[in-house]
Image: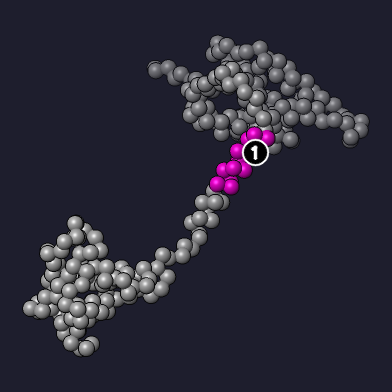
Amino acid sequence: MEAVTYRLEQFEGPLDLLLSLIQKNKVSITDIPISLICDQYMEYITQAQEMDMELASEFIVMASELMLIKSRMLLPREDDGEDDPRAGLADALLRYQQAKEAATKLSPLYAYYSARLVKDTDEISVDKTFVQDQDVSSLCNAVRRIIAYNNALEHAANTTFTPMISKPIIPVEIKIVSILHTMERYGVANLGELLQDETTLPDLIACFLGVLELIKVRKLLVADDTDTENALLDEHTRFILNTEADTANDGETDGQE
């Protein structure tokens, strides 16, 4: 016949065993049926001894404590306000139950953080190379200079500059017509004579651009018979009207005359 082996459940301590018995019997910790729980507790102790299990001394101490509470519960109480003999045991069981619930929540955190190491704080030595007095007023003055500099940059960025040419820009085409009128009147004229009647900088620039445009289309030819040294590089440069050139400016000149 095959032998049947039975392994008795192990508990971490007497409170663990008592809490397990209370949960199996579905009773309240604050109203423990001490007679029932005590009998079941003693039955566990007896089975453990029969199976040669090593029981810690606290299991035996708790057994005697349960027997004492059971005996007190059998004695009549003179006053209803007398302390319940189970109060101390109930308080210990409640605290143990709270500890087990907390351990269940903390166990995953321990598994996650237990292998981590904390680095010690590095000691930073005092910098003794800077010996100048560190005056707070100097720092405040430096901050004021920075703020003033930034304000000046913002003011400069928001300032509206007056344009160099404040009058309306004269179209170059108008100056070309005027230059052709002058050349047709005199036949030959130098650069100074073409520009001498211009009173403003915009007029002067427009007239000069008109001369360059007429040279480009060969309506004006540069005279090479001048006696002035380096005449081609200054206001004495002479121009001759090329009557054979066919440009769009001729039509404009005919219409203006």
- At label 1, the amino acid type is Cys
Q: Is residue 148 above or below residue 186?
A: above
Q: Residue at x 60, y 33 (%)?
A: 101
Q: Nearer the viewer, residue 212 or 57?
A: 212
Q: Is residue 81 left or right of residue 105?
A: right
Q: Nearer the viewer, residue 188 or 120?
A: 188
Please tell me how many numbered marks the rendered image carries.
1
Report the residue marked by disc 1: 140
Which color scheme did the rendering employ for the protein?
one colour
Q: Residue at x 29, y 70 (%)?
A: 195
Q: Is residue 125 left or right of residue 116?
A: right
Q: Which x, y percent locates residue 253?
A: 19, 84
Q: Which residues are magenta?
A: 137-149
The N terminus - image quarter:
top left
Q: Main secondary structure of the magenta part?
A: helix
Q: Which x, y percent locates residue 210?
A: 23, 72
Displayed quadrant of residue 146: top right
Q: Is residue 253 above or below residue 125?
A: below
Q: Residue at x 56, y 13 (%)?
A: 53
**Residue 145 among magenta residues:** yes
Q: Which x, y percent locates residue 133?
A: 65, 25
Q: Is residue 165 left or right of residue 142?
A: left
Q: Is residue 118 left or right of residue 232?
A: right
Q: Is residue 216 visible?
A: no
Q: Which x, y percent locates residue 169?
A: 35, 73
Report helix, strand or loop for mark 1. Answer: helix
Q: Is residue 185 visible?
A: yes
**Residue 142 among magenta residues:** yes
Few, some or many residues within 10 Å of mark 1 (<14, 14–19, 20+): few
Q: Nearer the viewer, residue 211 or 56?
A: 211
The residue at the far front in this view is 227
Q: Residue at x 20, y 64 (%)?
A: 237
